Amino acid sequence: MYIETHCHLDYLKAEPLEEIRRKIQEAGITKVVTIGVDPLNIDAVMLLSNTYPEIYFTQGIHPHDAKEATETEFNKIIERSKMPKMIAVGEIGLDYHYNNSPPEVQRSAFETQLQIACDQNLPVVIHTRDADEDTKAILKNFSSKLKYKGVVHSFTSSIELADFVLSEGFYIGFNGIITFKKAENVQKVVKITPVERILFETDSPFLTPVPHRGKENAPFYLPFVAAKIAELKNVDLEELKKQVFNNSIKCFPKLA
């Protein structure tokens, strides 16, 4: 069995949702986490979760959209945190690659949402790109206050950042990037990450794994991610699946 820990179901366009759900079930995926990222979609992901039993959701404002965050959105995150299928605060963090929001605004939104996670006893889903030092500095101030740490998802940063987040108790999420020819840096991080701290994700509809590059990504491609991780770590695939399934529930206790 698999748990898809990070996707954007409301963004998928290539097939009807019912067909996607059928293929997800056929792939052995029992639970799917669809991610909140901006003021326009946090309601949509909640509605999907309320509609389908296997779908869970997060609430958060992505660093790209930090400039759009208001008290209204932060209050929604707080209000919904007690809902049984809201499993985490996320996707939150820093992205200095695109700087769609000013860095200082990103940092403020990140810190505000980390505090919400601390106050509500929820884990976090973290996005970080080209922002290793500020990510470390901010997490140093919050990780000890988080009852449940969470995950640094779609990891593409340095081994140094990987070592730091692992030492702080976070999980690392890997997706189709690890199947790309030019992803040697991420593959190295896979190899040094203990199997007890790995999560599977697709980040669909983005980052479609080999051999399906060029198609819209979807959660039912998750087995390709799992197989590549088993290859990179030279471990038995079935044992890896069991371990990562348990990791997902430990990271996100509301999935139990």
Image (spheres, rainbow, N blue to C red):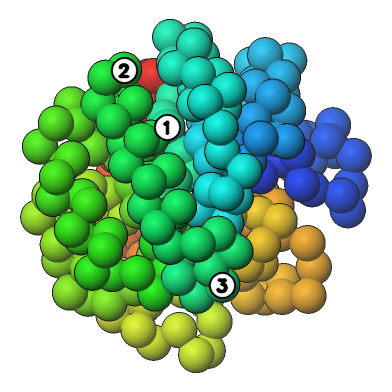
Q: Residue furthest bottom?
A: 182
**In this view of the protein, can residue 79 be seen by the observer?**
yes
Q: Residues within 10 Å of mark 1 (few under 14, many from 20)?
A: many
The residue under label 2 is 120
The disc at residue 98 is: 3
Q: Which residue is mark 1?
A: 89
Q: Secondary structure at mark 3?
A: loop
Judge the density around disc 3: few (<14), some (14-19), many (≥20) Cα neighbours within 10 Å: few
Query: Is label 2 in contact with label 1 (beta carbons under 8 Å)?
Result: yes
Q: Residue 70, how many percent across, how many down? A: 56, 32
Q: Is residue 48 left or right of residue 129?
A: right
Binning the other alpha carbons within 10 Å of mark 2 as few (below 14), some (14 to 19) or many (20 upward) gives: some
Q: Amino acid at mark 2?
A: Gln
Alpha carbons under labels 2 and 3: distance apart: 30 Å
Q: Nearer the viewer, mark 3 or mark 1?
A: 3
Pointer 3 or 1: first along the chain:
1
Nearer-the-camera pick, 31 or 49: 49
Task: Residue type at mark 1: give it.
Answer: Val
- What kind of residue is marked 3? Tyr
The mark that comes first in sequence, 2 or 1, is 1
